[in-house]
Image: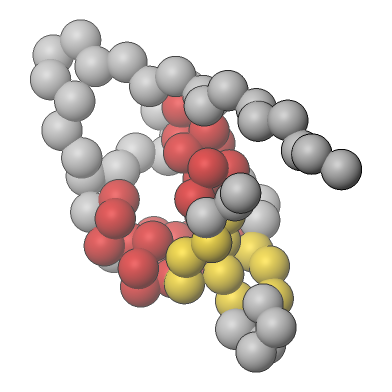
């Protein structure tokens, strides 16, 4: 199940400014979704993957050590 976060919660999770989330969204690095209340939310797994694949264009504030590695999460099968 996808985890969706509002801008402020996503920024706190990634240790970045909420303005950085706005910038990434405006540059189409990440996709925003409207939830059932009309609030803009972001898929946390998609954002993590975008950061990992961005080749340095997107950086977050979390420390990973000298040789930190970010790997995409495995895709989970959806039961019908």
Quick check: 19 left or right of 32?
left
Q: How is this picture coloured?
A: secondary structure
**Depth order, front residue of 14/78:** 78
Quick check: 76 left or right of 24?
right
Place of residue 78 in the rendered image (x, y in percent of width and height, measured from the top left): 76, 38
Which residue is found at the position 35% from the left and 68% from the top? Answer: 9
**Depth order, front residue of 60/36:** 36
Place of residue 53 in the rendered image (x, y in percent of width and height, measured from the top left): 53, 25
Residue with the most extreme bottom position: 37
Quick check: 34 left or right of 6?
right
Residue with the most extreme right position: 80
Q: How many numbered marks are there?
A: 0
**Depth order, front residue of 59/7:** 7
Residue with the most extreme front position: 80
Q: Is residue 73 visible?
A: yes
Quick check: 21 left or right of 75?
left
């Amino acid at each position: 199940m996808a985890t969706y976060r509002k801008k402020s919660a996503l920024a706190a999770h990634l240790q970045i400014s909420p303005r950085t989330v706005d910038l990434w969204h405006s540059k189409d690095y990440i996709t925003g979704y409207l939830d059932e209340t009309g609030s803009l939310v972001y898929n946390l797994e998609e954002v993590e993957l975008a950061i990992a694949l961005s080749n340095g264009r997107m950086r977050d504030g979390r420390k990973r050590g000298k040789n930190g590695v970010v790997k995409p999460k495995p895709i989970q099968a959806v039961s019908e």
